[in-house]
């Protein structure tokens, strides 16, 4: 199974299949499409691949792309933006899904939103194979990193995987590229936090997580300094508010979790990997319910500001950092 991609039914795609790829995570959707093409192209140099936007599709074009070909005996049709498929094409597509051509693999790519959901439901009833490309939750990103590194034949522990997420950020394409590079350059050795620091240490110093960690610890000046460095290095303001919101949500869940839980149960309750509990325990010192409420409110306001409610994102972020850090220890 592809890392980060859930296969709902079936095995590897083959000629004669209709494969449905759904989900908003573009990187994972693209990977699913490439994997499907690779699966049917293996051992054959004559597979013809055609990609078409659904909005341009009509009955004639569809019949041509799925009918007998003069130039290739085996073909793959990738139909993108399925949610925009013209209404008059829906019956034709459903008819095809019920009786697909033996020498064609049809891959249907849907963004995963509500638009075109009726078509998805009908395709699922036709028992097509579905791949769901859903972005991992923030706390699952180290697992994604570990899976990527294993995919390339390497190994990594939880701490190093977390360090790479902190250094590179949440973008899956960037994380996958970093994993590939690290395994390639590790010489067969495990990918360690030290190796990650050599490659991405400069970036790690200015990530949104460094800003959030300093502010949540009540260290106002270091947090502001990290914020200025991050913005100077091009970190998007929305990533700073996202990191701060994630940090405070985790802290709130940890603080309100029932006492006496085992580590594994506590991690499940809070929604974080077990190794994160030690950090949350340290961060929770000095925080009160009132302080957390004030900090979360400040982050919500800053998030609205950087998304358009305010003309000065930098000022909005500085105000958020100051409020959050000063809410540490607030009664």
Image: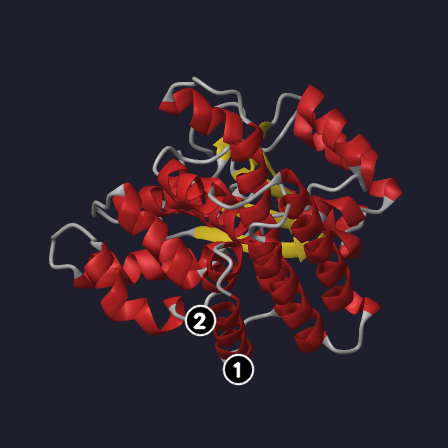
Give 137 or 43, whichever is nearer the viewer: 137
Is residue 110 among the parts visible in the rendering?
Answer: no
Indicate the quadrant containing the C terminus: top left, top right, bottom left or bottom right: top right
Left or right of 170 in this view: 276: left
Is residue 149 among the parts visible in the rendering?
Answer: yes
Q: Which residue is mark 1?
A: 232
Residue drawn at (56%, 50%) of the image: 329
Q: Mark 2 falls on what kind of element?
A: loop
Give the image location of residue 305, x and y in percent.
Answer: 77, 66
Residue drawn at (72%, 45%) of the image: 82
- Assess disc 2: are there few (<14), some (14-19) or many (≥20) residues with their C-alpha within 10 Å of its C-alpha: many
Give 44 or 140, whichever is nearer the viewer: 140
Give the image location of residue 265, x and y in percent.
Answer: 43, 20
Task: Tell which residue pokes out farthest to the right in this image.
Answer: 88
Give 258 or 65, whichever is nearer the viewer: 258
Q: Which residue is mark 2?
A: 206
Task: Tell which residue pokes out farthest to the bottom in this image.
Answer: 232
Between the C-alphas of marks 2 and 1, the distance is: 9 Å
So how many labels did they put on this image?
2
Q: Mark 1 falls on what kind of element?
A: helix
Give the image location of residue 169, x and y in percent.
Answer: 46, 59
Residue drawn at (51%, 33%) of the image: 254
Q: Earlier in the sequence, mark 2 or mark 1?
A: 2
Q: Is residue 28 above or below residue 235?
A: above
Q: Is residue 111 above or below residue 17?
A: below
Task: Tell which residue pokes out farthest to the front in this image.
Answer: 331
> Which color scheme did the rendering employ for the protein?
secondary structure
- Assess disc 1: are there few (<14), some (14-19) or many (≥20) residues with their C-alpha within 10 Å of its C-alpha: few
Left or right of 135 in this view: 52: right
Identify the image quadrant of residue 299. Answer: bottom right
Residues under numbered marks 2 and 1 in contact, where contact means CB atoms less than 8 Å apart: yes
Question: Which circle marks residue 220 in the picture?
Answer: none
């Amino acid at each position: 199974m592809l890392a980060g991609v859930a296969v709902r039914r079936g095995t590897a795609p083959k000629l004669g299949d209709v494969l449905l790829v759904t989900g908003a995570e573009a990187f994972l959707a693209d990977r699913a499409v490439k994997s499907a093409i690779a699966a049917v192209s293996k051992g054959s140099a004559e597979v013809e691949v055609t990609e078409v936007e659904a909005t341009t599709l009509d009955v004639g074009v569809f019949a041509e792309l799925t009918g007998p070909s003069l130039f290739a005996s085996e073909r793959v049709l990738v139909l993108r933006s399925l949610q925009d498929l013209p209404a008059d094409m829906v019956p034709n597509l459903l008819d095809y899904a019920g009786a697909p051509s033996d020498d064609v693999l049809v891959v249907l790519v849907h963004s995963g939103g509500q638009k075109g959901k009726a078509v998805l439901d009908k395709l699922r009833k036709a028992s097509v194979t579905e791949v769901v490309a859903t972005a991992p939750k923030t706390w699952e990103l180290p697992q994604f990193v570990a899976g990527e590194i294993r995919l390339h034949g390497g190994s990594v522990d939880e701490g190093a995987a977390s360090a790479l997420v902190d250094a590179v950020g949440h973008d899956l394409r960037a994380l996958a590229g970093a994993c590939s590079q690290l395994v390639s350059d590790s010489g067969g050795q495990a990918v360690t936090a030290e190796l990650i620091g050599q490659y991405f240490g400069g970036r790690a110093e200015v990530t949104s997580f460094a800003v959030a960690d300093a502010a949540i610890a009540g260290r106002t000046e270091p947090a502001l300094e990290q914020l200025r460095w991050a913005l100077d290095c091009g970190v998007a303001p929305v990533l700073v508010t996202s990191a701060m919101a994630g940090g405070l949500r985790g802290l709130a869940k940890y603080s309100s979790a029932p006492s006496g839980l085992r580590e594994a149960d506590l991690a499940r309750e809070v929604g974080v990997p077990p190794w994160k509990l030690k950090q949350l325990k340290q961060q929770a010192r000095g925080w009160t319910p009132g302080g957390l409420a004030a900090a979360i409110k400040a982050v919500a306001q800053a998030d609205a500001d950087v998304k358009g409610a305010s003309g000065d994102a930098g000022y909005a972020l500085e105000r958020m950092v100051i409020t959050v850090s000063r809410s540490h220890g607030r009664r």
